[in-house]
Amino acid sequence: MAVGRRGPGYRTGMNLLAELRRRFQQALDHLVDDSDVYTSMVRPAQDARFGDYQANCAMPLGKILGRNPRDVAESLVASLKVDDLCEPPEVAGPGFINLKLHQEWLAAETARLVDDPRLGHQAVEDPLHYVIDFSSPNVAKPMHVGHLRSTVIGDALVRVLGFQGQRVTGDNHVGDWGTQFGMIIQGYRQFLDADAYAEDAVGELARLYRLVSRIAGYHETSAALPGQRSRWQERQAELGRLEEMIAEGDKSRKSAAKKLRAEVAGLAETIEAAEVELAAVETDEHLARLADQHPEIAEASRAETAKLHAGDPENRALWEEFLPSCLEAMDAIYRRLDVEFAERLGESYYQPMLADVVESLEQRELARTSEGAVCVFIEGNDAPFIVRKSDGAFTYATTDLATIRHRVEQQQADVILYVVDARQGEHFRLLFDTARLWGFAETEFTHVSFGTVLGEDRRPFKTRSGDTVGLESLLDEAVVRARRIVDENDDAKPEGPELDEATRAAVAEAVGIGGIKYADLHHNRDSDYQFSWDKMLATNGDTATYMQYAHARILGIFRRGEVDRETLRQGGPLIVLGDEVERALAMALNRFADAIDVTATECRPNVLTQYLFETANAFSTFYNACPVLKEPDAGRRDSRLALCDLTARVLARGLSLLGIDVCEQM
RNA sequence: GCGCCCGUAGCUCAGCUGGAUAGAGCAACGGACUUCUAAUCCGUAGGUCGGAGGUUCGAAUCCUCCCGGGCGUGCCA
């Protein structure tokens, strides 16, 4: 889903592509009224053999005008004024128009980038206010790998849209009002280790949370197990009957049998997991005793949550005591990830508004009571959007609606992006539809959805023992692994190690954290992706390291040549593109602005990662083929130095827009 | 049952609103270091784009059906 594509805030920057499109527009205006549609068919050539850019509009135009597409292409070329930019356009195949830029023009455009702090990107003229809802972990539960994608993608979008010149508010809509607090309160009353709490409050609270949820889970699992076993038997028997029928030739049962087989397998898995969970508690003497003593702990926890929500002063005081240290623990991870939020308005913030939300929906006759719950029914959807449960409690649907009202009315949001798991797609469809009916039709809502992180076994990423992976330990491991690679490489340098301890540590941090982020960002966010240490920290290929290395090499050139980059830029060096690889690099550098805009409009950081990889690759090829410092011709040397400087700036800027650090040396 | 998503090279994935001979990385194989850092570069090989129809001048992309997988589905978030 494109965001703001037609909004007033979106405007393609001044760049090669935009200029070519303007030229085509003038030529197209002779032929059609809606030239906009066709200028978008001018795009970078998908194959270098066809030149630098191609226009694909002659074929559809031929159809509409009832003319031969090649003739249309010819007459388009005839009225096209691009001789200052390109070689004479060529018509190829069924009517493609191929464009190859003049060397001089490309060189001049590249030279313009040299003293342009925005690297050819023009900031939007009419910024929109984007509120970006991302990360949103539950307070007091340790963050885990599941929070990674939302955090990393959301942060990249904050940065990219901000660079575009949009007004951006990143908001961490934390879960600070949920059932986990009931569990912690319950744990605090029953199991507190006061010394541990004094020493490390968050650690102790996390322990209490895990303990209570484990005991509650034990009883729940234990209660459910017999039913699951008998259901498994039942299904298994039914499956046997079906298979017999199929064996006897009744093919019509095949699909039903398949479904059943999946269900049986699923049940078996659930049962096995349950048995493991129960055994783990039962074989632990301490845990077993606690479980035995507290059979009603889940109910008790729910009661504590209800009391908190009802305004019970004691529970409220505990909540207020717990919250700051929990938030501080979260912030420590964000600092490490270098992620910042402009706002952190959690669920609790919206609590006072919820009753009014429901009332307002009822008044407008959008919501009505059904089976005891207050629901909004959206046409075309089976499931209702429940804003108040039959027990009177509000749901996250209610909170989300209150949040929308706040963001639009108080914060003047034009666009709200939700960087959330794809599984919540249905919730957001209902939410957006309800919000529009409720009166927020002017606001653009987008669910920036993403797939699951899978382990190497293709199942959701877990530790070997089956627990979810804590985010902190994930980051630690990345850095440890990165450090090994840094050490290995530095130790292996032909002239001996170059990096001191502090530098090695800094490089390992950049490479490790950058590797994790890049692995996430370079996949299309819609698809699930397989987490792999080896791939993300590989020293070769399409990784963060590859670009960080290219960047470090460039700085190495300036260091060794004792060339001051700022002085170089101010000298206004001429760009000479004598070599094919220099030309290819210049082309890549000129595409920066477009890569930014596509990333922003599509909310797809992988567009930017792909661009950066291509640019780094163009540089590496150039680096291999074209000596810079050794180049005898001074003009040519300065031109190459300027290309190096530009590349370093594009890479550093691009990576920083993805939240990834670069190093001076590695 | 209904709804959503996915199936592209041995592996992991790109492929923008349909465009030319479907691309990358890894792995494999062959080359390039008295180095401006080889954490690099260049080259070779590898694909009935799950299958069958349809729309179109033109389909990995749009439509229908089928096969295979995942997820969601009334009071968790």
Image (cartoon, rainbow, N blue to C red):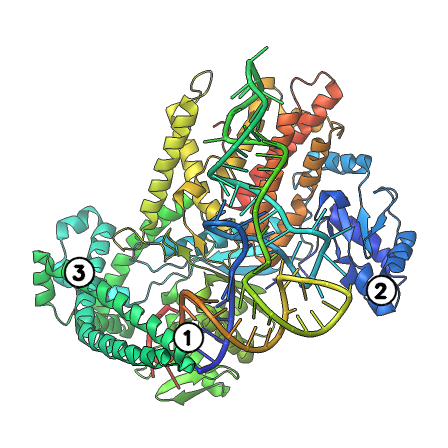
Q: Residues within 10 Å of mark 1 (few under 14, many from 20)?
A: many
* Residue that mark 2 sits on: A62
Mark 3 and mark 2: Cα distance apart in space: 75 Å
Q: Residue at x 54, y 36 (%)?
A: A547
- The x and y percentages for residue A288 are 9, 61
Q: Which mark is residue A329?
A: none
Amino acid under disc 2:
Gly
Q: Vertical placement of A54 versus A427: above or below?
A: above
Q: Residue under mark 1: which chain is it in?
A: A
Image quadrant assignment for residue A304: bottom left
Task: Tell me the SS state at disc 3.
Answer: helix
Q: Answer with left or right where residue A597 lies relative to residue B4.
A: right
Which one is nearer the viewer's eye here, B51 or A297?
Answer: B51
Mark 2 and mark 1: Cα distance apart in space: 53 Å
Q: Residue at x 36, y 36 (%)?
A: A481
Please tell me which of labels 3 and 2 falls first in the chain: 2
Mark 1 and mark 3: Cα distance apart in space: 29 Å
- The x and y percentages for residue A620 are 60, 31
Q: Answer with left or right where residue B30 lies relative to residue A183.
A: right
Amino acid under disc 1:
Thr
Q: Which mark is residue A188?
A: 3
Q: Answer with left or right where residue A205 lies relative to residue A402.
A: left
Q: Residues within 10 Å of mark 3 (few under 14, many from 20)?
A: some
- The x and y percentages for residue A145 are 37, 53
Task: Tell me the SS state at disc 2.
Answer: helix
